[in-house]
């Protein structure tokens, strides 16, 4: 269980804790501006810090998400994220 990175696909399985935040950040920084695929088909839960990193990357670069059959809370957040909105300006 955990995070596996192969090529430009990040696969999460089981429950993902904050210990993957730094390795995920490093991977994403090395691959800017390449598209990244996040495979969440076997992911049961995702720490909020990991989700924030994924959405931050999505705001600037192309991301693809693969979800499992069961709809999870993190999927609702990802599906509802609008990377174009800018409430800070």
Image (tube, rainbow, N blue to C red):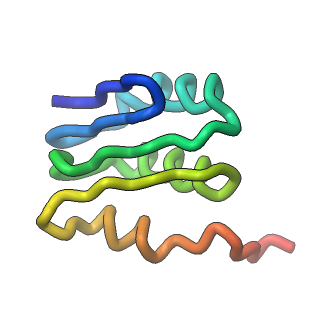
Q: Residue at x 50, y 48 (%)?
A: 54
How many numbered circles are shown? 0
Place of residue 82 in the rendered image (x, y in percent of width and height, measured from the top left): 59, 74
Residue drawn at 32 percent across, 62 percent down:
74
Instruction: Quarter of the image for the N terminus: give it.
Output: top left
Horizontal relation, residue 76 to residue 87: left or right: left
Residue at 12% over, 66% down: 70
Image x and y of residue 14, in percent: 15, 40
Q: Is residue 71 above or below residue 20?
A: below
Q: Is residue 49 left or right of residue 42?
A: right
* Residue furthest right in the image: 89
Residue 64 position, x and y percent, is: 45, 53
Q: At which x and y percent is residue 47? A: 33, 47
**Is 77 placed left or right of 71 in the picture?**
right
| 5 or 20, nearer to the observer | 5
The residue at 58%/54% (across/down) is 58
Q: Nearer the viewer, residue 16 or 10?
A: 10
Q: Quadrant of the C terminus?
A: bottom right
Q: Where on the picture, by quarter, is residue 86?
A: bottom right
């Amino acid at each position: 269980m955990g995070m596996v990175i192969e090529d430009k696909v990040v696969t999460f399985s089981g429950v993902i804790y904050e210990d993957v935040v730094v390795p995920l950040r490093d991977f994403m920084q090395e691959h800017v501006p390449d598209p990244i695929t996040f495979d969440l088909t076997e992911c049961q839960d995702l720490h909020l810090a990991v989700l924030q990193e994924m959405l931050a990357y999505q705001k600037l670069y192309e991301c693809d998400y693969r979800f499992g059959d069961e709809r999870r809370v993190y999927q609702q957040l990802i599906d509802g994220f609008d990377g174009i909105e800018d409430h800070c300006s």
